[in-house]
Image (cartoon, rainbow, N blue to C red):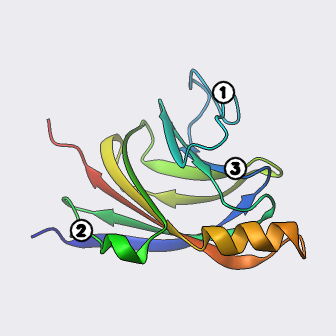
Amino acid sequence: MAQLVRQQRVDAYVGYHSFALQESDDGDLPVPFPDDYEQGVFLNGFPGRLDFYSGGHTHTATVTVEVWDGPPPAQDASAWDEQAEAEFESTSGEVAVWSGSVGRTETFALGSPGSWHLRAHCVGRAEAAALSEGEGTGHDVERYLVQFWPAKP
């Protein structure tokens, strides 16, 4: 059974419905954020980059990042608004959070460079959308769980 190795909570400053998780050593990325960002796609993967489409236009989402030593237990699908899986390649073992409005913000450690699988979940999308249409911004209304585990050769 897989074990949780580390967990970290980070803020994602959402601007124009978007934020990204991107390889921290991003100098050689073929498509850095926000190039080729696609509106309306919950999770879109690029080499060394993961784009997220948020339910709200401008707000601060909470992202809980988990690193596991193997595939984590499945989440109850009814508890989440969206779910998706992707692959991620890290050359440094560190990932940066990117905002469409303020650029690079926080970082978190995967623990080692290499190939990773991930599963992303989100809840609070409708509330974030309503908040964006009303008051404008909010914090911790939309919440993400992003689980990484090593890809085995």
Going from the N terminus, do you reach mark 3 or mark 1 first?
Answer: 3
In the structure shown, which secondary structural element does the residue marked by tag 2 occupy? Answer: loop
- Residue 151, relative to residue 111: is it above or below? above
Whether residues under marks 3 and 1 lie with C-beta atoms below 8 angstroms apart, the answer is no
- Picture coordinates of residue 115 (x, y %)? 31, 39
User: Which image quadrant is residue 40 in?
Assistant: top right
Neighbor class of circle 2 (other Cα within 10 Å; few <14, some 14-19, many 20+) is few
Type of amino acid under label 3: Ser
Residue drawn at (45%, 58%), measured in percent from left and top? 109
Residue drawn at point x = 88 percent, y = 73 percent: 134
Q: Secondary structure at mark 3?
A: strand
Say which residue label 3 marks. Answer: 18
Q: Which residue shows up at 31% across the image and 45% down it?
A: 116
Looking at the rendered structure, the kind of residue marked 2 is Ala
Is residue 94 toward the left or the right of residue 116 in the image? Answer: right
Q: Position of residue 106 (x, y in %)?
A: 65, 60
Give amino acid for label 1: Asp
In this view, the residue in front, 6 or 145, is 145
| Label annotation for residue 74 | 2
